[in-house]
Image: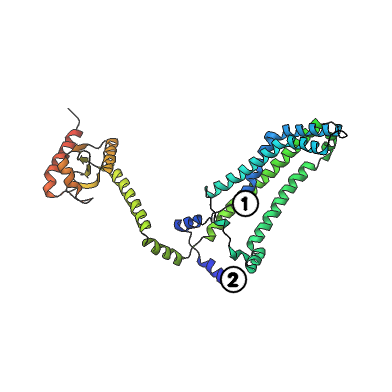
Amino acid sequence: MADDDKDAEDKTEAATPQKLEKARREGDVPLSRETVHAASLGGAALGLAMMGPETGRAMMQSASALFANAHQMQPREAAIDLTIAAAPAILGVGGLAAIGAVAATLLQTQFLVSGKGLVPQFSRLNPIAGFKKMIGTQALEEFGRTLVKLGAVGVALYWQVEDIAALVAALAEGPEALTDVIATRLGSLLSATLVSLCGIAAIDLLWVRIRHGRKLRMTREEMKDEHKENEGDPHFRAHRMAQMRRRGRRRQVAEVANATVLVTNPTHYAVALAYERGKDAAPRIIARGVDELAAKMRAAADKHGVPIIPNPPLARALYKLPEDAQIPEEHFRAVAEIIALVWRLKQPRQ
């Protein structure tokens, strides 16, 4: 027990995306059962609201006919009549309750369907581990949740049956009045219970996510080991390089807005040059691209009003130079002519 406490104290770091993904692949995701129960009850309540009144009246009529002709009808026939009358509500309520439970589960797990939970785990047969669960924190949490739910349902039920006189009076007014009273009371009971369970589900959902995050916490040593493992993984390196290339391309396109001119091939190459008179010793390359990236740079130049000057030999030559490099002497004259042309184009016409 002391070792477990020490491990928990050492796990001070939040789980990395890699560990969260690994846990997800193993079917270990936060799932609030109270949320599933509340969604299931909500579906059942919706089914009762849609089909309950009509089904209740049909069952009352069948029951009245049964009592009136009890001496003529066979028990089997009476059971069939009542089942047929109740079938729409039973199927509707059950179906919508199942849909609510499945939807709540899939939304919480982000549509994860895993068969890991179906694989037998013989460690669960350990009686010592089972006894620890029975007297552990999780058992106390389950007991507390059960008490809260029983209390909420008990209060809602007492609230509805406190005035029993209305039910007794409805018995004397005939089947229609009794059906209406029962439907009203049942609807109020379900509404009160559903509101209570939704509040419990919201708290449980938050707590389950917090507990899941705590369970997956890592020690600093585990994070270092994972980093070393990822560094040696070719798939991870390829993914990281792809991300870096995407960020680089986005940065190249964004830099075009700060350019003085964009020199193009005109379709294959694009080089963005920046020059501020009195500040820069020479024009410098702030972005460069080829093919698809060059097309995005041209679109950015159009958007930001940066002049586009086609010069295929110069564009190919400048593309070979590193970014943020000043124009070398052999290309200075050609670039200076382009900069001068841009300045003339920007001058207001007299």
Which residue is at the front of the view, 66 or 60?
A: 66
Residue on which the image places disc 2: 1
Task: Point out which mark residue 184 bears.
Answer: none
- Image coordinates of residue 50 in percent, x first then y, are 67, 34
The residue sitting at 53% across, 57% down in the picture is: 213
Q: Which three-letter amino acid code belongs to the residue tagged 2?
A: Met
- Disc with the residue nearer the chain's start (2 vs 1): 2
Badge 2 crowding class, 10 Å Cα cut-off, few under 14, some 14 to 19, many 20 or more, is few
For the N terminus, the quadrant is bottom right
Q: Residue furthest top?
A: 350
The residue sitting at 14% across, 50% down in the picture is: 328
Q: Quadrant of residue 271?
A: top left
Task: Point out which mark residue 33 bears.
Answer: 1
Q: Which three-letter amino acid code belongs to the residue tagged 1?
A: Arg
- Residue 254 vs 180, above or below: the answer is below
For the C terminus, the quadrant is top left
The residue sitting at 54% across, 60% down in the picture is: 215
Q: Quadrant of residue 131?
A: bottom right
- Image coordinates of residue 272 in percent, x first then y, are 23, 43
Task: Answer left or right for 143 relative to 219.
Answer: right
What secondary structure is marked by label 2?
loop
**Residue 124 visible in image:** yes
Foreground: disc 2 or disc 1? 1
- Image coordinates of residue 53 in percent, x first then y, are 73, 33
